[in-house]
Amino acid sequence: MWDRGDSDRFTAVQLVSGRDDVPSAAGAEDPAISEDGRIVVFTSIDRSLVDATFPVCVGECSTQIYRYDRDTDANGVFDEPPRGTPLTIVSAIDAGVGSRPRVPVAGNLASWAPAVNTDGSQVAFVTDATNLLSTKVAGGGQKTDGDIVVAEVLLGQLRRATGNPATGTIPGAHSNPALSDTGRVVVFDSVIPGRVTGDRSLIGRHVVTITSRPAVSMAAVDFGTVLVGWESEERYVSVLNDGPGAFRPTDVTSSSPNFRVTGGTCRRGVIVPAGGGCTVYMVFSATEPIVFAGNLTVSEVGDEPISVTASLRGVGGEPTLEANPPGLDLHSSVVNGIGDRRTLDVKNVSFLPTSIASIRLGGNNPDDFAVVGQSCTNRALNPDASCSVEVEFRPLASGRRSALVLLQTPTGEYTSAIVSGEASYAPQIGVAAPSVEVGGVLGIGGSGFPANSGIVLRFADGVRPFAIATTNESGVFLIEIEIPITEGAGERVLIASSPDEVAASTEVLVLRPPSKMPGVPGCGLG
């Protein structure tokens, strides 16, 4: 890495393809760099650069994709002594920030041609590896063609660029990937452009693009009761990006002058990567003793922009209650499971005794949380006295879930606190028997999938799906399927996957029925 802005020739050049300042003995190639110069990606066959489980080398070792971070503490100063591990492997399972401290398992075959987006939060590459995703794809094209995979670094996840990583039926016959600034657009050349784009008239090698849209969320905000003529204390709301791809906020607007944006990190030009977030700070001013409502919108500009909106609310009156903290972030949980439990305190900030008449949940996803304990109702709450409310996370869907805990006095004054958490599916499938003959019937059951969804069943190395099961309201399915006689025999991996990429797998031994020898007269057989 040569920093041409550094006039000191002893510090201008930094080693990237090495470990602890020791150069790689096997060398490195194909570098790519993020826009600000912080992230460098490259390929190497060196198995000593990082701690990982590598495949056995047959002849020359397979190339892997590596990512070097010149600013591990994100303080804006490059090439100072790192506070973390600057070099990580990308072409691996359990690689990246989001999944440590597991030991990564490197791709079992070669990966090459890395590309990086503007802030280095995404790395695209070509691979022949069959162990990085839940399904395999058939190869094709030239020697330099393969499957296009994108690593969401902060999420610690890999996804197949050409479609659903759980079903992946498009052969790996692509090369030369590149990423847009946000990483939402992947461009590459392909020898099967008709399969990628759906335009069957395309024949021969063409350059194609695939666009994805990230899931961006923001919780509702309720300032509660605020003294007329005064501004509330500053509150903040987070904009969170679950990917795929980054979000680039440009405009932060409030629909009402009573809710004023005072700052935050969701400012023009800042990229919010998948797995990251930004904040908006606000205050509320009540000009009369009524209910005020509005909307906060954080949006992009340009081609196919994304925006996210949160509702705003506040009331003018005599402040009586105060929630502390004003927001609770609960640990992640599985959908339809019982998750984290946290407590918030509620204080009487007035000069007179009061009581709490009601505790309820509102906001975006009130059904995903439950009040499981409290010491606030059926008692007097004197000035400066506090009580507590215990909230539990019970997510009913995946992604970022949020709600408002609303506490109100008998005379209508109230306060609120935001509760939020991340939820994901934990699907499982099982089979009624460990083996089945082709043409035979196999019973399959699954749980932990999205409710009322079509679940595609296929073998990981199969050409196409062979059945679809439908889950009930609890995300469970049971189905009997006939194994097509065209399926190959041997140890197979059965995949069950939903349209939104929730997948589970199990092993099945597929058998060929024994051959029947024709009878031969005189040998006791006919």
Image: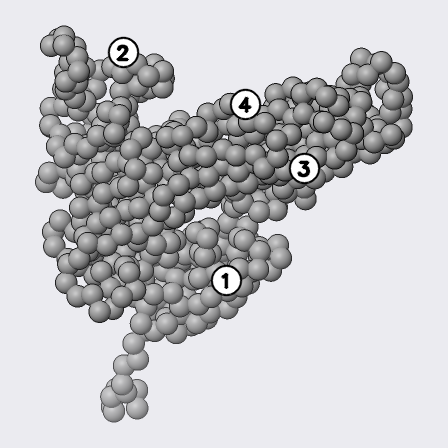
The residue under label 2 is 80
Do the residues under discs 1 and 2 have CB atoms within 8 angstroms?
A: no
Asked if the residues shown at circle 3 and circle 1 are in contact, with their CB atoms under 8 angstroms apart, the answer is no
Q: Earlier in the sequence, mark 2 or mark 3?
A: 2
Question: Horizontal and vertical percent for residue 425?
Answer: 52, 46
Residue where numbered disc 4 is placed: 262
Secondary structure category for the residue under label 3 = strand
Q: The N terminus appears in which quarter of the rendering? A: top left
For the residues marked 3 and 1, what is the alpha-carbon distance in whole angstroms?
A: 39 Å
Instruction: Say left or right for 237 vs 494.
Output: right
> Could you tell whether 125 is left or right of 259 in the image?
left
Contact, mark 4 vs mark 1 (Cβ under 8 Å): no
Distance from label 2 to label 3 (Cα)? 48 Å
Give the residue at x 74% y 30%.
315
Q: Amino acid at mark 3?
A: Ala
Question: Is residue 116 positioned above or below 283 on the image?
Answer: below
Question: Which residue is identified by label 1?
Answer: 454
